[in-house]
Image: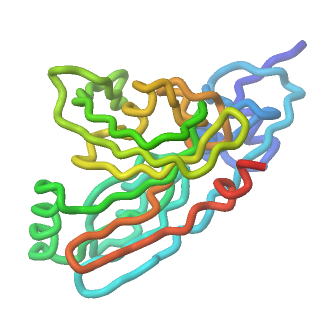
Amino acid sequence: MSKEKAYKLLALQENISNNQAKSLIDRGLVYVGNKKVMIARGEIDAKTSFKVHKVDKIKPIFEDDNIIVIDKPAFVNSDEIERQYKDAQLLHRLDRETSGVLMLVKNEEFRKKAIKEFKQDRVYKEYSAWVEGMVTEEMVIDKPILTQKRQNKAYSKISKQGKPAISEIYPDLVSGKKSKLKIIIHHGRTHQIRTHLRSVNLPIIGDTQYGGRSYQRVMLHAKKVKLLDYEFEAKEPKLFAHFSS
């Protein structure tokens, strides 16, 4: 059985450059069957057929003199969106596979006001997530989080040396042995929801970094944000609604 590097095979199959093929694999968009291809330079059967997931378009939700709000698709880095809007800068970030409300600010005066709201925990942040396990009761996870770098990637864990973090968990739907949750977060630490849910044995589906099973994407969506006099909402992706069936 002859083998070839995954990115080279993908480049041939999709008629794209090697660099484009590497980028697709690094983003987590390339699958063989139901398994995500994890390593671009990994060797794979030369007869392998790939499935490449398409990235949804970047959709603006709202814009005025102070702020631009984007419905961020999964598999797009927040920094990539910032580069597309040259007159604005990120107010916060979403993880690459997390979709939903992403805010960029257009002037320094508003940025300072907004950051003060974040620091004083006066920003309402609501997420939707599908997790492993059956959740039938509300809970509050109040556990400090410590974030470290591992091989140039952020990794968070529960630690007494960490910073305060609170996540409110509300059950929305139970389907088989998985549950859809509404989550309201305070503080907003790096990977807060992912870390907190893992700590109570409810890993997010698709979040292999924090104990979830492999899936098309990390099933986490930033649904609603209330900041100062603004309120923004990004509809859940179709995948969230269809996941229970």
In the foreground, 200 or 36: 200
Against 10, residue 235 (above or below) is below
Q: Name which quarter of the figure residue 51 lies in.
A: top right
Against 42, residue 99 (above or below) is below
Residue located 52% across and 47% down the image: 171
152 vs 159, left or right, is right
**Residue 206 visible in the shown view:** no
Residue located 68% across and 30% down the image: 37
Residue located 45% across and 77% down the image: 61
Residue furthest toward the top? 1
243 vs 123, left or right, is right
In the foreground, 37 or 216: 216
134 vs 184, left or right, is right
- Structure colour scheme: rainbow
Count of marks overlaid on the render: 0
Residue 115 drawn at (x, y percent): 14, 61
